[in-house]
Image: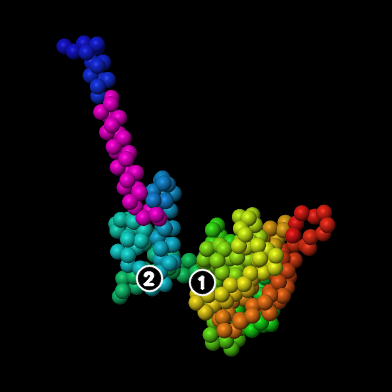
Amino acid sequence: MVTPSERRPAARAAAPRRAAAEKRSATEKRSAAERAPEPERRAATRGGGSRTLSRGLVVLKALGGDAEGATVSSLSEATGLDRAVLYRLLETLAEEGFVTRDPESRRYRLGLAMLELGVRAAQGLEVRRLAGPALRALSDDTNETACLAVRDREDVVVVEVIEPDGRFVQVNYRVGFRHPLGMAAHGKALLAFLPDGERLNELRPVRQRGVAYTRDEIEPGAAGVAAPVFDHTGRAVAAVGIVAPTARLPEPENVALRVLRSAREISERLGWRPRRPGDGGR
C-alpha cells in the first residue's frame, strides 16, 4: 500500500513533466500560428462566432484583390484557410449574394450584394454628398478627372470620381481604389495635415503650399494635384484634386489654385471657417 508520504514525492516528480508537456504544446501552437498566412493569424486570435465572421471577411478581402476571380485552391493559399472551411464559407456567402461562382472556370468573384453595400456606405459619407457640385465644377474647368478620397486607417480610399467628356486617355483612379496614406497627391495632401504627418519633414512643402503634386508615383505616366478638405473642427477629413496623364499636366502649379478653391468650397460646406486671430482651427 502506498502511503500519503510516498505519493507526495511522486506527484512532485510528475509536476515538472506536466509543465514541460504543456509548454511544448503551447510552443507548437504558437509555431503553427506563426506559419499561417497573416489573414488567418488575425482570424485565429478571435473566438466563437467572431472567428467565423473574421474568416468570412478574410475571404471577401482576398476576392476583392483579384479582379479575375479566385479558385478555392488559390484562396486557400492566400488566406491559409482549409479547403473544407472555405467551401462552407463560400457556400454561405454565395447564398447571401456576396460572392458568385463561375461554373466553367470554377472561380469565385465578389457578388452584387458587395456592390450594394459599397454604394450605400459611400452614400453615407457626408463629405462625398457635399462635395458633388465642387467636384463636377473642378472636372469641367480643368477637363480632367476630379477625385475625392478619404482616410481608412493607414490607407486612402477614393470615394467619388467625376470624369470629363471626350477624354479617351485617363488615369485608372476609380471609386474604391485604395493605396497607402502618404502616397500620391491625395494621400500626401491628407497626411500632411494630420497629426501623424505634421512631423514629417518631407511633407513640409505640402503644408506650406496647401497642395500636393506628384507624378509617376503610383502609376508610370500619371500625375496628380490635390488639397486637403477640413471639417467644422478644422480636422483634415478628405483630399480633393485631379489626376491626369503626365503629358497633359506638365506644370501642375497651373491648376493648384483651382484645386485649392474646390477644397475650400467643400470645407466650407462641411462647416469649416477660415482661421481668425486667436482661433485654434485652420
Mark yes or no: residue 185 visible: yes
Q: Position of residue 35 (x, y in %)?
A: 33, 51
Figure check: 281 above or below 146: above
| Quadrant position of residue 8 | top left
* Nearer to the camera, 151 or 189: 189
In the picture as drawn, the residue positioned furthest to the bottom comes out as 166
Q: Which residues are magenta?
A: 15-40
Mark 1 lies on a secondary structure that is loop
> Tag 2: residue type?
Gly
Q: Position of residue 211 (x, y in %)?
A: 67, 69
Mark 2 lies on a secondary structure that is loop
Residue drawn at (16%, 11%), measured in percent from left and top?
1
Mark yes or no: residue 238 visible: no
Q: Which residue is mark 2?
A: 69
Residue drawn at (39%, 51%), measured in percent from left and top?
41
* Nearer to the camera, 30 or 68: 30
| Quadrant position of residue 252 | bottom right
> Tag 1: residue type?
Ile
